[in-house]
């Protein structure tokens, strides 16, 4: 906190900028920082960004006392733009209600609540009834050291007419309770459900006329079917969320799926589909038919990305594609990449992309740009990246070798005597030995890359060859530089010995 003349540099900052700086800390730290500058002394009273956590206090009563004092000292005319509350215990605790009521009464727009329950608990949705709230995130977080994850059940209903974004994580929904939750958020556009649990439900329904972005990640295995009816849905992301999906989303533009099993999808089609990214981590033979069925449903896609494992499993089941013509008449770009970056010789599947599958994917769009990344290419690139780090370090270390008593960058070295040269020679011998080990490591890595390149088609080899050649040039220069320093030091050593003898 330097001063220029008699002016505190912090005093010139506008309030909104100071608020954003302080928003990076929790409220307890904000108050502690108020002593750093007279300008900051009372700035906390008008903070629109509030962060509270019981983890910053040794006991809950101390936290509750702090909250009471803070809220009474805050400017009551300043609205709360955003608030994050992290607490342990029950949602019915007095300080939780006090904080929530204060935020809602001060027109809070963004609310992030992280609860660390000590046992199963209900979270009253009435706590979140607000006419101003636009973004709500509720997470039931496991405590460190706990072996069990407790359930946070949403109870009752809420009134959030202005809410556009809802994120729920590790929350349990009972029966059809969730239907009223979504129906009370008439303007909801973004919905994220992570590690969702349900009780008494086989089918899970997400029906909303204004929903634009839907993300589903991880779920319990009791859920059988997910029904999505969203006429304005544009982006759908499904990660490790296993169920049969029945989707009615005619405006869908982007689909991202990743999981260990093929996506089971039923739809009347996606006429507006621009992008689809499908990654099945460990597909098996029974998955081939499901994957093929999924691709047929995505026939309108413009940009398609598949993982190499999917291509391999389909190529081993060519009977699926033989009688079929390519349905991808709008395809502009097809990208294939390996999910698991095995060393080539350890890859579980080594089935090349069959000509039948290639025709099925590309014949419908002759001008489609096509890219496939092989495991050998990724492994070779990773070796080259590692070599670049080693060589850069060696170049820096090589430039640091100087005679003892001679400063780097000093063009007028001190008088050289026999002991200086002898000491330098001993140091250089150690350095050279270490460098020999490094050069051996570099050579072994380059030989490994050569072996990989030999297995690649010429088109893939051309991608890596420039860096491969450059690495060889750098290694040659490094070896020559070490040899030069050895010769130079040896000459100095011989000169010093001659001078010593003549004296």
Image (cartoon, grey):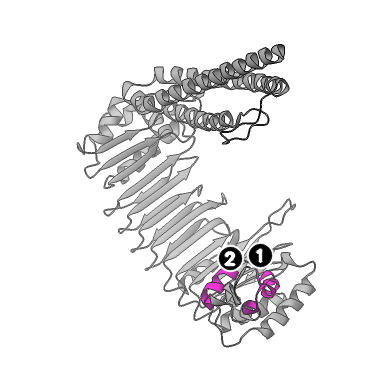
Residue 101 visible? no
Q: Position of residue 377 (x, y in %)?
A: 42, 28
At 48% from the left and 55% from the top, the residue drawn is 216
Asked if 369 appears above or below 269 in the picture, the reply is above
Q: Position of 89 compared to 295: left or right?
A: right
Q: Tell me residue 206's x, y (percent).
A: 44, 62
208 left or right of 428 in image? left
Magenta-colored span? 13-41
Labels 1 and 2: the sequence-earlier one: 1
**Dot 1 corresponds to which residue?**
115
Q: Give me the C-alpha separation between circle 1 and circle 2.
A: 8 Å
Q: Quadrant of residue 349?
A: top left
The rendered magenta stretch, by its main secondary structure, is classed as helix
Mark drawn on residue 98: none
Residue 389 in picture, x, y percent from top left: 53, 33
Residue picked out by circle 2? 138
The answer to whether residue 250 is magenta is no
Task: Tell me if residue 253 comes above or below residue 184 in the rendering.
Answer: above
Instruction: Confirm or deny contact between disc 1 and disc 2 (CB under 8 A).
Output: yes
Q: Is residue 86 left or right of residue 17?
A: right
Judged left or right of residue 240, residue 153 is right
Neighbour tally class for label 1: few under 14, some 14-19, many 20 plus, Cα within 10 Å: many
The residue nearer to you, when weighing 163 against 381, is 381
Quick one: label 2, few (<14), some, or many (20+) residues within 10 Å? Answer: some
In which quadrant is the N terminus drawn? bottom right
């Amino acid at each position: 906190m330097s001063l220029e003349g008699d002016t505190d540099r912090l005093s010139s900052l506008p309030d909104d900028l100071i608020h954003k700086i302080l928003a990076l800390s929790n409220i307890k730290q904000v108050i502690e920082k108020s002593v750093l500058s007279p300008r900051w002394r009372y700035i906390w009273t008008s903070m629109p960004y509030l962060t509270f956590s019981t983890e910053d206090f040794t006991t809950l009563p101390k936290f509750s006392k702090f909250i009471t004092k803070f809220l009474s000292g805050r400017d009551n005319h300043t609205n709360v733009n955003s608030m994050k509350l992290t607490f342990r215990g029950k949602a019915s605790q007095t300080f939780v209600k006090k904080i929530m009521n204060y935020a809602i009464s001060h027109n809070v727009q963004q609310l992030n609540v992280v609860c660390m329950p000590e046992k199963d608990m209900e979270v009253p949705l009435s706590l979140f009834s607000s006419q101003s709230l636009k973004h709500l995130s509720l997470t039931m977080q496991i405590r460190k050291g706990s072996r069990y994850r407790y359930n946070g059940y949403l109870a009752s209903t809420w009134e959030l007419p202005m809410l556009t974004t809802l994120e729920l994580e590790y929350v349990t929904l009972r029966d059809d309770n969730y239907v009223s939750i979504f129906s009370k958020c008439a303007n909801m556009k973004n919905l994220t459900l992570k590690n969702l649990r349900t009780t008494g439900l086989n089918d899970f329904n997400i029906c909303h006329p204004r929903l634009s972005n839907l993300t589903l990640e991880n779920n319990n295995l009791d859920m059988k079917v997910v029904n999505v009816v969203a006429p304005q849905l544009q982006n759908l992301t499904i990660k490790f969320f296993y169920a049969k999906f029945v989707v009615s989303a005619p405006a869908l533009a982007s689909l991202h799926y990743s999981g260990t099993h093929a996506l089971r999808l039923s739809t009347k089609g996606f006429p507006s589909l621009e992008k689809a990214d499908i990654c099945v981590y460990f597909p098996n033979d029974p998955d081939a038919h499901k994957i093929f069925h999924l691709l047929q449903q995505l026939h309108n896609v413009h940009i398609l990305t598949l993982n190499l494992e999917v291509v391999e499993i389909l190529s081993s089941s060519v009977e699926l594609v033989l009688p079929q013509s390519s349905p991808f008449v709008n395809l502009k770009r097809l990208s294939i990449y390996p999910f698991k970056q095995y060393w080539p010789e350890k890859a579980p599947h080594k089935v090349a992309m069959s000509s039948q599958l290639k025709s099925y994917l590309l014949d419908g769009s002759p001008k489609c740009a096509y890219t496939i990344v092989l495991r050998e290419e990724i492994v070779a690139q990773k070796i080259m990246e590692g070599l670049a780090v080693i060589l850069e370090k060696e170049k820096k270390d090589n430039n640091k070798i100087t005679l003892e008593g001679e400063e780097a960058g000093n063009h007028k070295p001190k008088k050289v005597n026999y002991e200086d040269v002898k000491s330098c020679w001993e140091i250089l011998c150690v350095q050279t030995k270490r460098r020999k080990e490094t050069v051996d490591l570099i050579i072994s890595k380059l030989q490994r890359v050569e072996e990989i390149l030999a297995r690649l088609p010429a088109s893939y080899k051309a991608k890596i060859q420039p860096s491969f050649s450059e690495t060889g040039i750098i290694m040659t220069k490094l070896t020559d530089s070490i040899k030069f320093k050895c010769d130079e030091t040896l000459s100095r050593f011989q000169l010093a010995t001659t001078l010593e003898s003549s004296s």
